[in-house]
Image: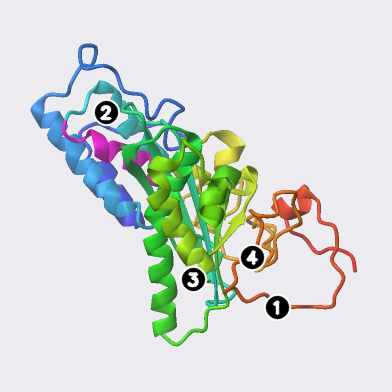
Amino acid sequence: MIPYIKKVIKAFPEKITGVQSTPAGDRLFQVRPPNEARFLPEEQARAFHHTTAQLLFLSRVRRDIQTTVAFLTTRVKHPDDDDWGKLKRVLTYLSSTRHLRLTLSATSLSNIVWYVDASHHIHDDCKGHTGSILTFGRGATTSSSTKHKIPSKSSCESELIGLFDKVSDVLWTRQFLEAQGYKIHTNVVYQDNMSTLSLAKNGYVSSSKRTKHIKAKYFFIRHYHQAGELDLQYCPTDQMWADVLTKPLQGSKFRLMRAFLMNCPIDYEDTSRSTFIPSDNPTDAPMKARSLRPNPSPRGCVETQSPGTYVPHTSTPTKNVTWRDALFPRRLPI
């Protein structure tokens, strides 16, 4: 995709110069009211639409720009000067990281891991945004960043909408691998909202007047969780790698999330040619310390294991792992 990035930048009407460390600023999702916006002339709007479509194709492998591209695709009908500036920023970022490659490695195709996250009321029409990641080891095998079709009343509902929208992909992935002859041991879906997990796992037990209008969604997820087709587990927010696909992160948080998405060093810097070689050393890119059995929690009804999920038993005593060891795995003394 390196020649393709050069082609896109060269074909852009304006010259792209400078350096950007992130594809979008904090105000990516902010839109001016129609009476204050300066809409682009027809020829420039056509160029905006064309370049956005090119970036949409590029985002299949450059997963670090998916959030920005997902927003730009919602603005192709009536782009304004602000949208043009946001498009120039993502092109500047691509020019600064044109040699960044997506590298994938898998430890096992029998253990499927999903991360699903959502942002609440982040769009100007008060709709949320969902991000998801599928991984089998290192790097995002597939990922998505999509705008919600309907608005929501709370962050819990936004998370539930995102989870409901991705269940089809979660189930399809399992069925596809089983059709190829793989025996699926675990199909874990990580979620960082405890209220959403309570609704998805317990149904009426965790329902209230505020959630009756969305009961079809959480009962749909609950059915497949209880059937063992997927296993919902809690994941701390600082280890929810799909967070970068729901909002424009900045600084070290973005670099950390990008390292997981693209399987690249955290301090990646582009050079005239790519010199990064994937290594088995886990310190290159942080990985969440996965546990097939959730840690004890006072929210026992939320942390229950799905009845259909295989959990290997071992007699080896467990060791205490700090948050630093979880974010930056290293060889622990025996």
Using the image, determine if residue 64 lies above or below residue 87.
below
Amino acid tagged 1: Pro
Sequence-wise first label, 2 or 1: 2
Sequence-wise first label, 2 or 4: 2
Q: Is residue 82 visible?
A: yes
Sequence-wise first label, 4 or 3: 3
Residue annotated with mark 3: 229
Residue at 45%, 87% (x, y): give it. Answer: 181
Counting other residues with Cα less than 10 Å from the Cα at mark 3, is it few (<14), some (14-19), or many (20 or more)?
many
Residue annotated with mark 4: 305
> x%, y% of residue 79?
21, 28
- Residue sitting at the far top: 36
- Residue sitting at the far bottom: 181
Disc 4, disc 3: CB below 8 Å? no
Q: How is the image coloured?
A: rainbow
Q: CA distance from mark 2 to mark 1?
A: 53 Å
Q: Which residues are magenta?
A: 63-77
Examine the residues drawn in magenta and state their main secondary structure.
Answer: helix
Sequence-wise first label, 3 or 2: 2
**Quarter in which the N terminus is drawn:** bottom left
Q: Which mark is residue 84?
A: 2
> x%, y% of residue 50?
18, 42
> x%, y% of residue 44?
15, 30
Observer-nearest of 13 and 84: 84
Residue annotated with mark 1: 312
- 9 vs 132, left or right, is left
**Quadrant in the picture for residue 289:** bottom right
Q: CA distance from mark 3 to mark 1?
A: 17 Å
SS at circle 3: loop
Residue at 53%, 46% (x, y): give it. Answer: 196
